[in-house]
Amino acid sequence: RPTHTLYSKLLFNDLKLFHKIFYETTPIKLPSFLHKYSTVHEHRRPTRLQTNSDPTDIICTEYPRSQAFTNSYFYRCSRDWNKLPAELRHTADHDHFCSKLRVYFWEKTESSAVPADPTST
């Protein structure tokens, strides 16, 4: 049976909080360098990123110039958020999102598990 790593547990909790921030169900707001795609795409000339984007994508307007910025909660989570399947990000209900996220993580864990050695008996 696959087990979750500490990293996946932290990522799971980070994404749960980020979901609340994205859907504005917590007093924490997105920082000024992060924008919901749906709020910026009409004001900018389309680029390859924007023409392929989903309304739940997060756009970062700052280029990370330090490792500290790259590892910061909001920058890191925005990138992880954008890697989630769109159908998962479109789930506005927090409890339903958490259930779907848990299933998504289990499926990823199972698919990345090391297969048994076929030569061992």
Image (cartoon, rainbow, N blue to C red):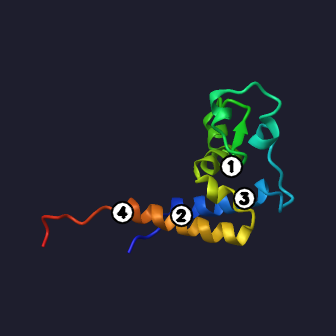
Q: What residue does disc 4 label?
A: 113
Residue kind at label 4, given as amino acid type: Ala
Q: What residue does disc 3 label?
A: 19
Which of the two marks, 2 or 4, is nearer to us in this view?
A: 2
Q: Residue furthest right?
A: 27
- Asked whether disc 2 touches disc 4, contact meaning CB atoms under 8 Å apart, the reply is no
Distance from Cα at disc 3 to Cα at disc 1: 13 Å
Residue kind at label 2, given as amino acid type: Tyr
* Residue 5 to residue 74: above or below: below
Most foreground residue, 8 or 58: 58
Residue kind at label 1, given as amino acid type: Tyr
Rendering coords of residue 51 (x, y %) = 66, 33
Distance from Cα at disc 3 to Cα at disc 4: 27 Å
Distance from Cα at disc 2 to Cα at disc 4: 14 Å
Q: What residue does disc 1 label?
A: 73
Secondary structure category for the residue under label 3: helix
- Asked whether disc 3 touches disc 4, contact meaning CB atoms under 8 Å apart, the reply is no
Q: Which numbered disc covers residue 104? A: 2
Q: Which numbered disc covers residue 93? A: none
Rendering coords of residue 1 (x, y %) = 38, 75
Most foreground residue, 84 or 31: 84
* Residue 96 to residue 53: above or below: below
